[in-house]
Structures are given as structure tokens and as C-alpha cells.
């Protein structure tokens, strides 16, 4: 797929909608001869950098109400025909899941590892701890020692920070966010617009207040 168009995919491993969107990637890649480039981040850190995180206080609108978001996610899962359950437990430091994906990427398994974590969290009901991160790597046949070293490496943390900076500079404010060139699509429900663009429908370029010129 060397001639494939690339879609940048900023995702959070604890994000319901990132999981739901990820279940559609194989279909979209096959249908549109594109390739998704996974960019795992701690989405809360991205929101904090923008100075406004709607999940750190009482919901300011119905769309952020936890019961509605669970209901909405179950509706999307039914639409897609995929399993969904609310997370049984996530690490205290959500960044560690993004770091684990980046560590798996050192062995060419970033997307496969991300999909495995998504299944563990949203389909199998695993309460994710650090031991589960290593278990997922073993299940994929990764070198355990190399994975552990990469997970703890300062360079992996710097790569994550760089991804956060990159996402913010491009105007992203949450996950999942997709970029097709300069065109940004936020949310699982915007996959419809992304696919339309891949089919050749002309879409405007987003120029938000947080977007850096040339970013």
C-alpha cells in the first residue's frame, strides 16, 4: 500500500470513541486505499494544554454527561456490530497506555498493540494495570525486554510530549481526531465526512484559534 493516502489518527486508549473509530479502520483502509497512521496520546493532557478540560468538572452540557456518553457509545457499537462495555479500570496515569503503544511501535506493532489494548478495555472488561500492558506485548509476540525498556525510556516520554505538541499545533482539541492533509475531523461520528473526503468530496480546511500557521 505504498501509494496509499495517509490519515493521521490521534487517539486515546481510554477513549470510547477512539475505540469505536478504530473498529472501522480496516474497512476504511480497504475501501479507500488509505493508511491510518496511529498517534496515541493522553487526551486529558491535550485538553489541559488548551486550558479547558470538560471532564475535570461537572458536565457543562448533555453531551459530556457520563450516562449519555455510555448510552451513545452502546448505540454506535450496535450500529457497527462490535462489542462494547464501559472500562472496568484504567491506570492512574493515562499517559502510560500511550507510552506502551509507542514502545510497541519500536517493534513495528503500534497499531496492532493499540487494537489489542482497545479489545482488552472495551470488549473483554480487563481492568488495565501495568502488568496487562506487558501481557498485551507478550500476546503479540514482542520482545518483552525490549518492550519494557522502551516503555520506561525517557525518549518514549519525549515522543509522547512531541505528539501532544503536534496535535495542539494542528488544532486538535480531543480524541479521536483525524487529519487528511490539512483537513481535520473530530470524533467517531465524523468518519462519514472523512470517507466522503477520501471519495473526492471537497471539504474546507479547518483554521481554528489554536492552529499554528503552517502546522
Image (cartoon, helix red, strand yellow):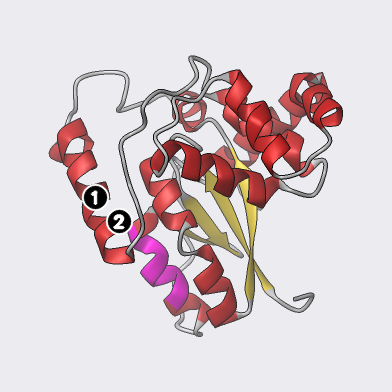
Residue displayed at 57% across by 53% down: 9
63, above or below 132, in the image: below
Q: Are marks 1 and 2 in contact (CB under 8 Å)?
A: yes
Horizontal placement of 106 versus 43: left or right?
right
Q: Which residue is mark 2?
A: 77
**Residue 210 point in image, percent of width and height:** 49, 40
**Residue 37 — which label?**
none
Q: Which residue is mark 1?
A: 74
Report the number of numbered marks: 2
Measured in 3D between alpha carbons, the distance from the residue under mark 1 to the one under mark 2, in whole angstroms, is 5 Å
188, above or below 160, in the image: below
Q: Secondary structure at mark 1?
A: helix
Residue interval drawn in magenta = 189-195
Q: Secondary structure at mark 2?
A: helix
**Residue 170 point in image, percent of width and height:** 57, 47
Confirm whether residue 207 shows in the render. yes
Q: Nearer the viewer, residue 103 or 45?
A: 103
Confirm whether residue 65 shows in the render. no
Q: Nearer the viewer, residue 214 or 52?
A: 52
Amino acid at each position: 500500500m505504498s501509494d496509499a493516502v495517509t490519515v493521521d489518527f490521534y487517539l486515546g486508549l481510554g477513549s470510547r470513541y477512539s475505540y469505536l473509530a478504530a473498529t472501522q479502520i480496516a474497512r476504511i483502509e480497504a475501501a479507500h486505499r488509505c493508511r491510518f497512521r496511529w498517534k496515541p496520546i493522553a487526551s486529558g493532557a491535550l485538553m489541559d494544554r488548551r486550558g479547558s478540560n470538560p471532564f475535570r468538572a461537572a458536565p457543562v452540557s448533555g453531551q459530556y454527561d457520563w450516562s449519555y456518553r455510555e448510552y451513545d457509545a452502546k448505540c454506535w457499537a450496535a450500529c457497527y456490530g462490535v462489542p462494547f462495555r464501559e472500562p472496568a479500570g484504567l491506570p492512574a496515569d493515562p499517559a502510560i497506555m500511550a507510552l506502551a503503544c509507542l514502545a510497541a511501535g519500536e517493534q513495528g506493532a503500534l497499531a496492532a498493540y493499540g487494537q489489542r489494548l482497545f479489545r482488552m478495555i472495551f470488549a473483554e472488561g480487563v481492568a488495565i494495570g501495568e502488568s496487562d500492558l506487558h501481557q498485551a506485548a507478550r500476546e503479540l509476540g514482542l520482545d518483552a525486554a525490549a518492550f519494557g525498556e522502551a516503555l520506561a525510556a525517557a525518549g518514549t516520554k519525549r515522543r509522547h510530549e512531541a505528539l501532544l505538541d503536534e496535535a495542539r499545533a494542528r488544532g486538535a482539541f480531543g480524541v479521536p481526531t483525524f487529519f487528511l492533509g490539512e483537513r481535520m475531523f473530530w470524533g467517531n461520528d465524523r468518519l462519514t465526512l472523512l470517507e466522503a473526503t477520501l471519495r473526492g468530496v471537497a471539504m474546507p480546511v479547518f483554521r481554528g484559534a489554536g492552529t499554528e500557521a503552517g502546522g
